[in-house]
Image (cartoon, rainbow, N blue to C red):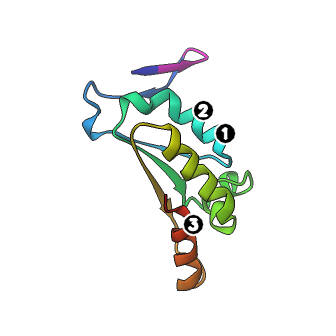
Amino acid sequence: FVAKAGGHAVFQTIPTRERVVFQLGCSSATDALRAAEVVARDVVAVDVNMGCNKHAAVSCGMGAALGCNPAAAADIIKTLARNIPCAITAKIRLQDSPSRTLDLVRALEF
């Protein structure tokens, strides 16, 4: 699989999908679903990056910013789980307390 944008490959993978996990950054369930639909048949899992603390990601509501918005994070994961035929995972950061971390993890359960 190769998706091209403006003449450049934006995603390219090996012929076998059994070892490919696609990680994406997003701030909404709609954007996550649109991106995952492009690659879902060519990967074994889609991982949502909820751990990136880079300014470019956090300032757009992506990455670690989702840890402060469990409702949006849960909406992303649950939308993907309902609509994408492969495994869905999330990479998160530990929150400022164990109880907040557990609250986030529980919100992401589906």
Q: Nearer the viewer, residue 13 or 7?
A: 13
Q: Position of residue 58 (x, y in %)?
A: 69, 57
Is label 1 in contact with label 2 (beta carbons under 8 Å)?
yes
Tag count in the figure? 3
Is 44 a magenta residue? no
Say which residue label 3 marks.
107
* Dot 3 amino acid type: Ala
Which residue is rendered at x = 56% and y = 34% of the image? 35
The mark that comes first in sequence, 3 or 2, is: 2
Q: Choose between 9 and 28: the one closer to the eye.
A: 28
> Tag 1's secondary structure?
helix
* Residue stretch in magenta: 3-7
Query: Which residue is painted at 29% across and 28% down in the image?
Result: 14
Q: Position of residue 98 (x, y in %)?
A: 52, 84
Which label is found at residue 30?
1
Would you say 61 lies left or right of 22 here? right
Q: Amino acid at mark 2?
A: Arg
Up-down: is 96 above or below 81? below
Q: Looking at the picture, which amino acid does disc 1 mark?
A: Thr
